[in-house]
Image (cartoon, helix red, strand yellow):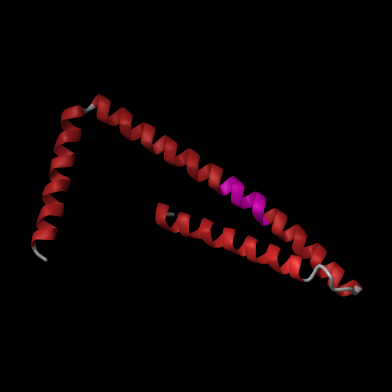
């Protein structure tokens, strides 16, 4: 999963949790056994979603740190190759922008 789609998924899940919490607060004054049961299930689901979201954010952060560490290590171990790669990327970007 790309970083952009992961970030979008996290944002979407966060928005769903916030919306569900707002709905639960809005129906807090409603009475009736079926409403209480639905609110209880929704509360459990929101809490579970919040926990999964927090775990996902921790996992994504850990993977990003690992990738940054790996990239830093590669650059330190292979400085000339890193310079060559950066120059090649710059040339490609320059060519793409020059064609516009």
Q: Position of residue 30 (x, y in %)?
A: 84, 73
Name the main secondary structure of what is drawn in magenta. Answer: helix
Q: Nearer the viewer, residue 39 or 64?
A: 39
User: Looking at this rendering, what residue extends furthest in the top direction?
Assistant: 77
Q: Which residues are magenta?
A: 49-56
Q: How many marks?
A: 0
Does the magenta-highlighted stretch encompass residue 30?
Answer: no
Residue 10 to residue 89: above or below: below
Q: Position of residue 50 (x, y in %)?
A: 65, 53
Q: Residue furthest right?
A: 33
Residue 51 locus on image (x, y percent): 66, 49
Q: Quadrant of residue 72?
A: top left
Picture residue at 71% right of the left edge, 69% below the top: 23
Tell me, yes or no, whether the highlighted magenta stretch contains residue 53: yes
Q: Is residue 17 left or right of residue 92?
A: right
| Rendered-image quadrant of the N terminus | bottom left
Q: Residue at x 15, y 53 (%)?
A: 93
Residue 68 versus residue 36 in the image, above or below: above
Task: Decide if residue 74 is in sight here.
Answer: yes
At horizontal 72% and vertical 60% (from top left) the residue drawn is 45
Residue 2 visible somewhere in the drawing = no
Image-based side of 75 in relation to 91, left or right: right
Residue at x 38% of width, y 32% of height: 69
Asked if residue 4 lies left or right of residue 46, the reply is left
Q: Quadrant of the C terminus?
A: bottom left
Residue 64 shown left or right of residue 56 in the figure: left
Nearest to the observer: residue 50 or residue 77: 50
Q: Position of residue 18 (x, y in %)?
A: 63, 61
């Amino acid at each position: 999963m790309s970083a952009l789609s992961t970030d979008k998924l996290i944002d979407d899940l966060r928005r769903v949790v916030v919306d569900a919490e707002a709905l639960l607060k809005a129906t807090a004054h409603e009475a009736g056994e079926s409403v209480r049961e639905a609110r209880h299930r929704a509360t459990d689901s929101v809490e579970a979603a919040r926990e999964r979201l927090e775990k996902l954010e921790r996992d994504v952060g850990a993977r990003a740190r690992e990738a940054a560490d790996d990239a830093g290590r590669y650059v330190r171990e292979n400085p000339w190759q890193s310079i060559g790669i950066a120059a090649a990327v710059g040339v490609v970007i320059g060519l793409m922008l020059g064609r516009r």
